[in-house]
Amino acid sequence: MNRPRFDAYSKVLLTIIAACLVWLCFGRSHFVARVDAQTSQPLQVRYQTVWAENFVLVDENGKARAKFGCQAGGSPTLTFDDGKGRDRISLGLADDGTPSLVLVDGNGQPRVVLGVAKWDDPRTGRSVKTEPSSLILSNKGGKIIWKAPPR
C-alpha cells in the first residue's frame, strides 16, 4: 500500500526539478520589471503561481533545448534536447502515475531506463512492461545487456 505515497513523491520531485530548471535557465534577470530610480537596482516581480500547459526553454539561438509539459493523457514530462532536435533525457510519469527516467544515445536508442519501460521482447515477440523499480541497460543495437530485477 506504499504505491500512492511513492506516486505522490514522484510528482513532487518532478515539480521541484522543473522549478529549479526554470530558475536556472531564466535566472533572476528575466523577472525584472523596472529599475529603482534612486539606487539603479532592478526591482523584482514575484509571481505566486504560473499556469501553463508547456514550458519550452531555448538557447541563445532560439533552439528548443528543454521542454516541460503534459503528454496527451495529461501526464507530466520533462525532456532535454541535444541541440540537434533529439530528445536525450526524459523524466516523466505514465498515465497510471508510474515514473520513469530514460537516457537516449545520439542515434535515438534508449540506453538506460529507470522505472517503467515498454518494449517488444525479441525472444518471445510479446510486449513487455517493467516494474516501476526496474533498471535496464542496453547496448547501441537495443539489446538488453543488464536489468534488475532480472525477470
Image (cartoon, rainbow, N blue to C red):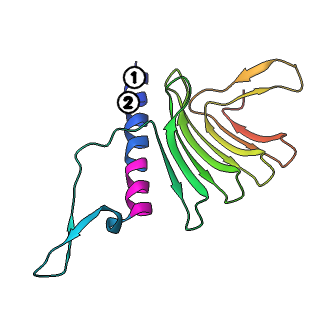
* Distance CA(mark 2)–CA(mark 1): 6 Å
- Residue 95 x/y as whole percent: 54, 22
Taking the spot 83% from the left edge, 41% from the top edge, the residue there is 142
Report the amino acid beneath label 1: Pro
Dot 1 alpha-carbon crowd within 10 angstroms: few under 14, some 14 to 19, many 20 or more: few
Q: Is residue 106 left or right of residue 82?
A: right
Q: In the rendered view, would you say 92 is above or below 64?
A: above
In this view, the residue in front, 104 or 72, is 72
Report the amino acid beneath label 2: Ala
Taking the spot 44% from the left edge, 36% from the top edge, the residue there is 53
Residue assigned mark 1: 4
Q: Under tag 2, what secondary structure? A: helix
Which secondary structure is most common in the magenta stretch? helix
Task: Locate the C terminus by quadrant.
Answer: top right
Residue assigned mark 2: 8
Taking the spot 59% from the left edge, 56% from the top edge, the residue there is 65
